[in-house]
Amino acid sequence: MIQDTGTIEEFLARHSADVEEAVRAAAAAEIMPRWRQLADHEVDVKSGPHDLVTDADRKAELYLTETLRALLPGSVVVGEEAVHANPATYEAIQGAAPVWIVDPVDGTRQFVHGDDGFCTLVALAQDGVLRASWTFAPARGQFATAVRGSGAHLDGQRLHAGAPAPGEDLRVATSHPDYTTDDQKRALLGLWTPGVAPRACGSAGLEYLAVARGESDAVAFSWEAAWDHAAGLLLVEEAGGAHLTITGEPFRVTGGNALPFTAARDAATARRIRALLTQGA
């Protein structure tokens, strides 16, 4: 079992490409053959009509669970579908063992509808610290990676989030109202103000990628599920961005965050969004 971050770094130096290959292989074997080919019996509803799961989600997660554990002996996997089946497995994210955080199909609703706005998300963390992440949008042919301290890359090109253009409205992707409490709705309403152009988010992973690329200025989300955020938060950080909860603390992948929170292209934008959320609350 890995005992310190030095050996995590050594693992990443040797095996980051193997993780990327595992993600690509899972998509090729279990996701893309089902894109725009799903039968009715391959789609189920979980918590509500917008919360869907497909055979692609389940089978890709099983593929990644087996492969990632083999790559890093002693590691554990926290995957969205495994946690849905047994919520107690989420507790592993707070343990000492290296943990793979997996969302096999982020943007399942888009996947079901035949849109290309979905991706596979994998992050590696230990002791609550995100060490590396992999974001693959197979229908778009985009692969983004981040390693703590080594930057973020999209298809081999370094990502720099930059800063919003002075005087232009901030482009902010926000949680869908169906997934917010009344208090969170009030906080998010703080973004409906001159100088901000909020819109409902799509795939969380792709929204984070848009921030890391400088195509969007920020996200403002109201839920904690680590598989939706872990990969993207590190991607944004390593591209030069920042994230803050409504109380001004960085988002913790292990949970217990004050919500909503924001991730933005730069620290100044994160502070501005956080201030607006506080005013709305």
Image (tube, rainbow, N blue to C red):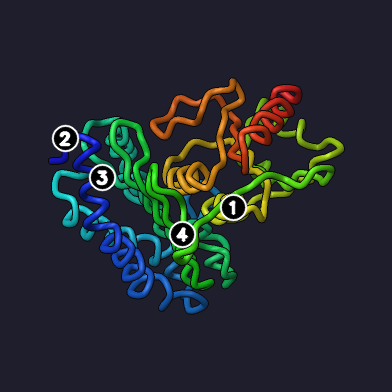
Quadrant containing the N terminus in the rendered view: top left
Q: Nearer the viewer, mark 1 or mark 2?
A: 2
- Residue at 53% over, 55% down: 159
> Quarter of the image holding residue 63?
bottom left
Query: Mark 2: few, some, or many residues within 10 Å (few <14, many ≥20)?
Result: few
Q: How far apart are marks 1 and 2 (CA)?
A: 33 Å
Residue type pointed to by label 1:
Glu
Q: Which of marks 2 and 3 is in front?
A: 3
- Residue at 31% over, 36% down: 93
- Residue beneath label 1, please? 207
Q: Sequence order check: which comes first, mark 2 or mark 4? A: 2
Residue type pointed to by label 4:
Ala
Image position of 51 (left or right of 30): right
Q: Sequence order check: which comes first, mark 1 or mark 3? A: 3
Q: Nearer the viewer, residue 228 or 47?
A: 228
- Residue beneath label 2, please? 3
Query: Mark 4: few, some, or many residues within 10 Å (few <14, many ≥20)?
Result: many
- Residue at 55% over, 56% down: 206
Query: At numbered mark 3, what does the secondary structure look like: helix, strand or loop?
Result: helix
Q: Sequence order check: which comes first, mark 4 or mark 1? A: 4
